[in-house]
Amino acid sequence: KAGVTQTPRYLIKTRGQQVTLSCSPISGHRSVSWYQQTPGQGLQFLFEYFSETQRNKGNFPGRFSGRQFSNSRSEMNVSTLELGDSALYLCASSLDRGQGAFFGQGTRLTVV
Amino acid sequence: QQQVKQSPQSLIVQKGGISIINCAYENTAFDYFPWYQQFPGKGPALLIAIRPDVSEKKEGRFTISFNKSAKQFSLHIMDSQPGDSATYFCAASRGLTGGGNKLTFGTGTQLKVEL
């Protein structure tokens, strides 16, 4: 069974631009969550989608948004990039609530 | 507000020894407690998880001990090996009570196993 796939693996963007990251969950998993990982703040929850609906949202500004498609694939978008948005963005998929969450390798975003 | 406190920040253990990492939580609504292992350049990998109705769970060399009254849980790695050198994160969620799969993570422990 294929794991969680995130694309692209690496991304360099300029301040003020926007970026879209993609996540393909494990087959059959309907829950997709996104996390931001930085050395200073650690792993922080962005949002969770289940059956195309946002089920949970973390404490991030509105510049961070996401969506989920009918095949459970998910995308997250960050608009008006800031230097502080440089981070490893991780996607995790689960069968349902309270089940194990399996992470992808992440997308390393660098904002210059 | 940090809801899951993890210690120590770093740990050095001799090969064959026992590595112990501790976590404490504040939110009594948490009902699912996983541990993750992360190697440099990789995403976190689910190691083992426990629910509060169980005091201990063992999978191979990894054991979670859970103390509901103290709101603490710990990871024990028996017979630690150099290949176990990684960063370990504890986490908690309230998935069964409607919180979905939002994981609140500890700050991580860098484990180094020396020969």
Image (cartoon, rainbow, N blue to C red):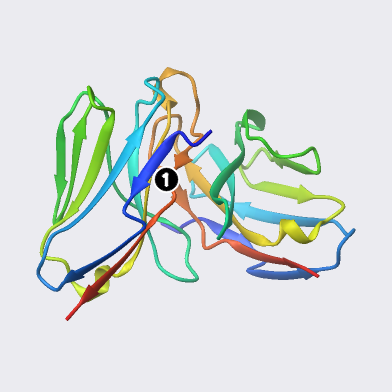
Image height of A85 relative to A51, above or below: below
**Residue at 41%, 24% in the rendered image:** B27
The residue depicted at 57 percent of the width and 61 percent of the height is A106
Q: Quadrant of residue B108?
A: bottom left
Residue lying furthest right in this view? A16
Q: Tell me the quadrant of the picture where the C terminus of chain A can be found.
A: bottom right
Position of B55 with respect to A80 (left or right) is: left
User: Is residue A59 at least partly visible in the picture?
Assistant: yes
**In the image, A62: left or right of A23?**
right
Q: Nearer the viewer, residue B76 or A99?
A: B76
Is A44 drawn above or below residue B60 in the view shown? Answer: above
For disc 1, the neighbor class at 10 Å (few under 14, some 14 to 19, many from 20) is many
Specify the quadrant that holds the N terminus of chain A. bottom left
The chain containing the residue under callout 1 comes to B
Does residue A28 show up? no
Horizontal side, residue A96 vs residue B56: left or right: right
Residue B77: percent from left, percent from top: 18, 57
Residue at (57, 56) in percent of width and height: A40
Horizontal and vertical percent position of residue A23: 62, 53
Residue B104: give x, y in percent of width and height.
47, 38
Q: Residue furthest bottom?
A: B115
Place of residue B57 in the rendered image (x, y in percent of width and height, measured from the top left): 16, 40
Compared with A52, A15 (above or below) is below
Q: Nearer the viewer, residue A78 or B111?
A: B111
**Secondary structure of residue under mark 1:** loop
- The amino acid marked with disc number 1 is Gly
- Residue positioned 72% across, 69% down in the render: A11
Q: Which residue is mark 1?
A: B106
